[in-house]
Amino acid sequence: MVHCDVLIIGAGVAGCTAALRAAELGADVLLATKDALGESNSAHAQGGIIGLAHSGDSPELLASDIESAGAGLCRTEALELLAAQGPRLCRDFLWKRVGVPFDIDETTGRPETTSEAAHSARRIYHVKDATGKAIQTSLSEAVLKHPNVRIITETCLLDLITVPHHSANPRAVYDPIQVKGAYLLDASGKVDMAIAKRTILATGGLGYIYLHTSNPSGATGDGLAAAYRASARIVNCEYMQFHPTTLFIQGHPRKLLTEALRGEGAHLLNAGGDRFMSEFEPEDMELAPRDRVCRAMFEEMAQSGKTCVYLDLSPLKAKLDLEVRFPTVVKACIAEGIDPLNELIPVVPAAHYFCGGVSVDLDGRTTLDGLFAVGEVACTGLHGANRLASLSLLECLLWGYRAAEAAVEDCGRVGLPDISTLRPWQPVVSPVEPDPLLIEQDWNSIRSTMWNYAGIVRAKNRLYRGRNDMGYLYHRIDSFYRSAPVSRPLLELRNGITCARLILKAALQNPQSCGCHYRVD
Ligand code: SIN
């Protein structure tokens, strides 16, 4: 059993920011991460993070861009807070304090800015086209150096420890639900209790539950599923965002091709070489918000019967050295036998970012006492029904920072939980190890169901079928889980099916098309 003031689960940009800020404020921090430190969904973000524009921008303009990308469903206080405080924090904390090596504009000595779809100003800080990785690396180094942060890697969140669910006292049923820490599963299969005054979930997203995704395989919605099991309020699950441009090579995993390419002037073409966006989005063309670009691509592919469209980088060649500005993209294409400087790049949309999540306030507090959530696992309301490009890292930063401050303040007035009233983990004792083939087949069912029935364009009959199929599969997986020794693959599968059901249920219940939830019935 380990004790700490603040337990942070997940070490992406949100988790590391929270850890660093809480440590700076003197808290004893335990940071647990499923993989090695530095491996996270955040590290895959390419384009950038919203910073301070050199000119022609204002908090009002940023707020209005977020609101219109979010299809009018954004939470006003969240977007006003972010527009007022976020870009400055990006400059002061990430650039000046943590030392993220943003590309620098040589004339001003300040971070260089670029543009992306649906932004009215050039306000995106970047580190070539690997911004997430650079921010993640700098933050990881900073937390590693801080004496107040203990880091445990290769450790999964098994469940949140809650009273009354995990209380040894039957009378605790009369208490409000409180989070006291988490059961954590290490790489050797051992389960330990981490007891904390405050717990911050920063477990990231769930894109892996879709067949085609820009996310890594660890994006299985672990925090969302655990919060759901603990009875936290979960909202906006129908709003799954798809990214328009991932590299399409039949039979290979999708690779992200950053939005900044279109921001700098790349075109989308159909197989006949036409800029088909003029038919669907004559005003904004390739720079319409992601949901609208994805639907236009979907329609174009449906009408033409083709499996992909193409990204044309030739308009960029006159103004940029592509190999210097977009080395990740160039490398990814060349690895698949495509010369992006001289050939069209085949692209399709893929599941990218979950706009819903555990409902939180402006400090990241969930509806459960003792539990905060930050980053993609949380729903601050900032993204409404569709996220603006390059906003996620800034949200991770601002809410990670604020949640740490609120959690540390709480620590000053609450004591460590009385552990004598908490039940240790009850392991399943069984000689039978879970069959990997069953796990793989269950994942195939989840991922293809979600792609086909809860994808870019949705219909009632498909959602209904998906909900029923996933309901049936859930019961099988749950009994599988309860009868075999716990393991990371089994845990992730159970979390994946839980998240799939949350999305299908929300999508079925909401007949109103809005942002990235698009119904055709
Ligand atoms: C991209 O570079 O297009 C991905 C980053 C984001 O989703 O904002």
Image: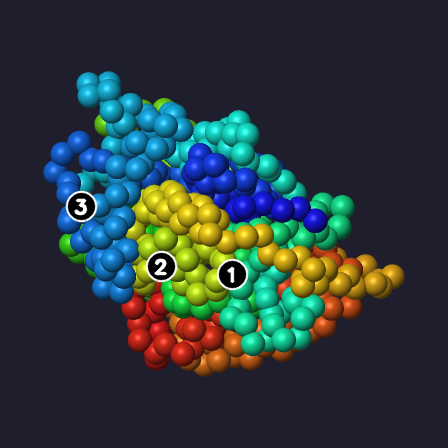
The residue depicted at 34 percent of the width and 29 percent of the height is 95
Helix, strand or loop for disc 1:
helix
Is residue 75 found left or right of 2 in the rendered image? left
Is residue 39 found left or right of 424 in the rendered image? left
Q: Residue furthest left?
A: 56
Residue 495 seen in this snapshot: no
Disc nearest the viewer among 2 and 3: 2
Q: Earlier in the sequence, mark 1 or mark 2?
A: 1
Residue 137 pos. (x, y %)? 48, 31
From mark 2 to mark 3, how far is it between C-alphas? 20 Å
Q: Amino acid at mark 2?
A: Asp
Disc nearest the viewer among 1 and 2: 2
- Image position of 474 with respect to 340: above or below: below
Helix, strand or loop for disc 3:
helix
Q: Amino acid at mark 3?
A: Pro
How packed mark 3 is, by other alpha carbons closer than 10 Å (few <14, some 14-19, many 20 or more), is: some
Q: Earlier in the sequence, mark 2 or mark 3?
A: 3
* Residue behind mark 2: 361
The answer to which quarter of the image holds residue 438 is bottom right
How packed mark 2 is, by other alpha carbons closer than 10 Å (few <14, some 14-19, many 20 or more), is: some
Residue 163 seen in this snapshot: yes
Residue 8 pos. (x, y %)? 53, 47
How packed mark 1 is, by other alpha carbons closer than 10 Å (few <14, some 14-19, many 20 or more), is: many
The residue depicted at 59 percent of the width and 66 percent of the height is 163
From mark 1 to mark 2, how far is it between C-alphas? 16 Å
- Image position of 158 with respect to 38: above or below: below
The residue depicted at 31 percent of the width and 36 percent of the height is 90
Residue 196 pos. (x, y %)? 57, 51
The image's mark for residue 224 is: 1
* Residue behind mark 3: 59
The residue depicted at 63 percent of the width and 40 percent of the height is 152
